Image (cartoon, grey):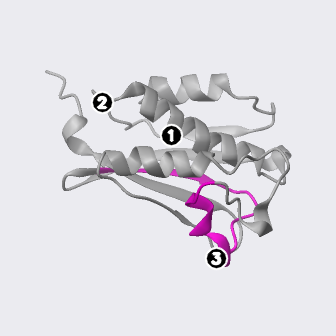
Amino acid sequence: MHTLIHQVISSLDVPPSFKFEISENLPVLYSQEVYLFQIFSNLIGNAIKFHDQPENAVVTVSCSILDEWLTFIIKDNGPGIPVQVQKQIFHMYDTGSALHRSDSTGLGLSIVRKLVEEKGGKVWVESTGRGSSFILTWPASEIVVEEQ
C-alpha cells in the first residue's frame, strides 16, 4: 500500500506546497490493485481539488486493523464538509450543493463507494468544522503475511 499511495500521489496534479503524511505501518496486500488505486486516487484527488488553503495543506493516510477489517483513513485539513451533505456526496452525480464545482463530475465518491462495498467494506466521511476524514474498511484477509 505504501508504494501504491506514492504512485497515486505521483499521478495527480499536486501543488508543490501540499504536504503528505503517510503512515509507515500500511499493510502489504494481495488485492485488486486497480480498485485500490482508483479508490485512493479519488479520495486524495478530492482532498487536493477541494482544499481552500493549498499553502497550508496536509493530507494524511493511515491504517489500522480491527478484527477482520483494515480501516484506512484519508484525512485533510481543508474546509470540511457540511453535515447536511455528507451522505449525499456518495450518490452518483450529486456533489452536494454546498460543495459544487464546475470541474467535478459527481462520480468519484460514488465509484469509491461501489468498489469498497463490492469487497464487503464500508466508506463514510467524518467532518465537523475544519477538515475531513474519509474512512473505509477493506478485508484484512487480503494482507500478505511476510515470513520473518
Nearer to the camera, 94 or 16: 94
Of badges 1 and 2, nearer the viewer stands: 1
Q: Residues within 10 Å of mark 1 (few under 14, many from 20)?
A: many
Q: Over which residues does the magenta segment extend?
A: 70-92
From the image, tell me which residue sits under label 1. Answer: 39
Mark 1–mark 2 contact, CB under 8 Å? Answer: no
Give the residue drawn at x 77%, y 62%. 99
| Residue 71 seen anywhere in this rendered image of the structure | no
The CA distance from mark 1 to mark 3 is 22 Å
Q: Is 84 covered by the magenta stretch?
A: yes
Query: Image point 67% across, 54% down: which residue?
Result: 93
Left or right, residue 145 beside residue 86: left
The answer to which quarter of the image holds residue 87 is bottom right
Disc 2 versus disc 3: nearer the observer = 3
* Residue denoted by label 2: 29
Question: Is residue 142 found left or right of 134 in the rendered image?
Answer: left
Residue 86 part of the magenta segment: yes
Q: Position of residue 6 (x, y in %)?
A: 55, 26
Residue 139: give x, y in percent of width and height: 26, 45
Q: Nearer the viewer, residue 77 or 88?
A: 88
Instruction: Tell me if residue 61 comes above or below residue 8 in the rendering.
Output: below
Instruction: Name the amino acid, label 3.
Output: Val
Along the viewing direction, whichever of 98 and 1 lies nearer the viewer: 98
For residue 147, above or below residue 95: above
Q: Amino acid at mark 2?
A: Leu
Which of the labelled discs sits on residue 83, or is there none?
Answer: 3
Q: Secondary structure at mark 1?
A: helix
Q: Amino acid at mark 1?
A: Ile
Q: Position of residue 138 (x, y in %)?
A: 33, 46
Q: Residue at x 75, y 38 (%)?
A: 18
How crowded pointer 2 is (Cα within 10 Å; few <14, some 14-19, many 20+) is rated as some
SS label for mark 3 = helix
